Image (tube, rainbow, N blue to C red):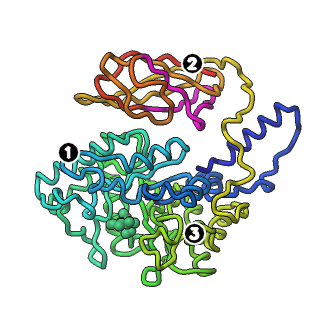
Amino acid sequence: MTRPRTTVVALAAGLLAAAGAFVVLSPSANAAATLGAAAAEKGRYFGTAVAAYKLSDSVYSGILNREFNSVTPENEMKWDATEPSQNSFSFSSADTIVNRAVANGAKVRGHALAWHSQQPSWAQNMSGTTLRNAMLNHVTRVATYYRGKIDSWDVVNEAFADGSTGARRDSNLQRTGNDWIEAAFRAARAADPAAKLCYNDYNTDGQNAKSNAVYAMVQDFKSRGVPIDCVGFQSHFNAQSPLPSDYQANLQRFANLGVDVQITELDIEGSGTTQANSFASVVRACLAVTRCNGITVWGIRDSDSWRASGTPLLFDGNGNPKAAYNSTLSALGGGTNPSSSPTSSPSTSISPSTSPSNPNPGGSGCTATTSVNAWNGGFVLTVKITAGSARINGWTAGLTLPSGSSVTNTWNATASGTSGAVSFTNVSYNGGVNAGASTEFGFQGTGSAPTTTPTCTSR
Ligand code: 9MR
């Protein structure tokens, strides 16, 4: 995945300083060459929907690695995929995407916890309290499983009707009572307090009856303290549903309610300059709204799109960047893509493993604190590493698991083993921690959670 250019510049500066060189780095001489790097320079992410079964396609994964620093599983986290029979959870396809993203320092948008569509057949046949409880159990279990790995969750997807009524969409979930949406948000907050919780919908990209209804719901949630952090605007555009002229104004009015806004499923049918200009307009709108966190396109190549015949994406079927790619990169403030080949890497990249010599050997220490979420037979331990009075450049946290307990899954760190005394060492993107600052990692385990405070060793 792409990394913020600041990291590359810092590393390059460190290497040059170590070699005794004196240089002035000019930002304009080094415009970001990828979507992710250019967005990062603007404090935003640039993401794509990912299909797990395509990751073995080297053209697909080559573009993914090079260009994007956020991913959304396209179908793998939906209710039918994650809970195919009641209370029996299946995370392997989603894990393929999530673990790869976490290892590469990319954000993950979780999509979607509660939705009228793509429900497993057992849920489709439920109603009333039974369905409400099944939905809340689903939200809790899935959000708990991915706790610590998700930047933003689409907690509820597409719950409003199209057209001029401003009403809720009729569905089995809606028929459990109008409060089903807030109940889902409260359950998601309890399960993963660190993830941003979003409401996500389409045909809400401009001001209209549907977006007005979502706006009123967000306003109501904020006034009553229902946990909501963000609103997703899917942004599926074509001739029948074009990019609205008040797109930016609509994003801004939601942001003014005190929520972040995200462009979550962008695709624009068309070709050539017209399409390129529309993509650039979307980017400019996001950059103009301080609380717009980032943009996700709904697939990589045109051939990956759910509506491939409309050629609505940034890369053609062979993986070559289109005019829309160039206009998007340029609107983000990036430079020309150095690669016309879909699989090669940017020549300017510096591997994070070639880190500069440690200016502070031995560091000045770090401390580790934990928070635990345990249930009968398992737990998630979140560990916060805090640097002491000087910056550290790497850390290892050690703890001993109770007998019979084992680590099943670790994020934002590498574990030395699964049972007994286990050390957790930083990964490439979170070893450097400034004086007094913190970073977090976590792991899931079976058995009972450790109760002792981990040791922390810095480098
Ligand atoms: O792109 C997804 C496609 O592969 C699925 O078949 C489809 C099934 O509902 O869902 C598509 O993604 C949708 C997303 O989950 C919600 N917003 C609309 C997207 C495009 O249909």
Q: Which residue is mark 3?
A: 314
* Residue 273 placement, left or right of 357: left
* Residue 142 placement, left or right of 321: left
Q: Which residues are magenta?
A: 421-442
Q: Residue at x 50, y 55 (%)?
A: 56
> What's the amino acid at mark 1?
Asn
Q: Quadrant of ligand 1?
A: bottom left
Secondary element type, mark 1: loop
> What's the amino acid at mark 2?
Thr
- Residue 445, position as x, y percentages in the image: 34, 29
Q: Is residue 256 visible?
A: no
Q: Which residue is mark 2?
A: 457
- Residue 278, position as x, y percentages in the image: 57, 75
Up-down relation of residue 447 to residue 355 (above or below): above
Q: Residue at x 60, y 36 (%)?
A: 428
Indicate which disc residue 87 carries. 1
Q: Of residues 235 and 421, which is closer to you in this image?
A: 421
> Which residue lies most toward the bottom here?
239
Q: Of residues 278 and 213, which is closer to you in this image?
A: 278
> What's the amino acid at mark 3?
Leu
- Residue 83, position as x, y percentages in the image: 25, 50
| Res 221 → quadrant | bottom left
